[in-house]
Image (cartoon, rainbow, N blue to C red):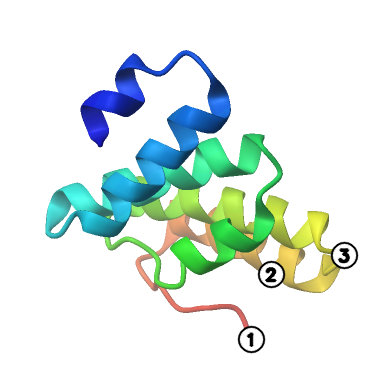
Amino acid sequence: ARVAATRSSHPHERAAHLLLAAQMADGTAAGVLRVEAAEALTSLSDSASVLELLGDLPTDRSLAARATWCLARACVALGDRSTAEAWLSRGLALVDDDALTEPA
């Protein structure tokens, strides 16, 4: 699925392949694929899929920060500004601190 995503020229097809790859992956590769798929889905305004895919933040700080950006954008698209702001704050906190908890 990852190879198919790389070869895809259409954004919807690429996102679908990345989503499949992310759902099938485990270990370190899973976090990378989940964030790549979430970024692709975010660009297509598939907010529900982003929220489902990123139910848990990756443990890698850089990936987690990228994930919070996708989550914030998804929340804005769904009209949930307060949760979006919480995700943005969480992403900014990743720059300064190691805690990886969901916003309240």
* Circles 2 and 1 in contact, beta carbons < 8 Å: yes
N-term mark: 1 or 3? 3
Q: Which mark is residue 86?
A: 2
Question: Total marks drawn?
Answer: 3
Q: Is residue 27 left or right of residue 85?
A: left
Disc 1 crowd, CA 10 A, few/some/many (<14, 14-19, 20+) = few
Residue at 52%, 36% (x, y): give it: 40
Q: Is residue 36 left or right of residue 80?
A: left
Query: Residue 91 sits in which quadrant?
Result: bottom right
Callout 1: SS: loop
Q: Is residue 59 visible?
A: yes
Query: Residue 5 sits in which quadrant?
Result: top left
Please say if 4 is above or below 18: above
Q: Which mark is residue 79?
A: 3
Mark 1: amino acid: Ala
Query: 55 or 84, which lies in front?
Result: 55
Q: Which mark is residue 104?
A: 1
Q: How far is mark 2 from mark 1, CA to CA?
A: 8 Å
Q: Is residue 47 left or right of residue 68?
A: right
Disc 2 crowd, CA 10 A, few/some/many (<14, 14-19, 20+) = some
Q: Position of residue 19 (x, y in %)?
A: 40, 47
Q: Is residue 21 left or right of residue 86?
A: left
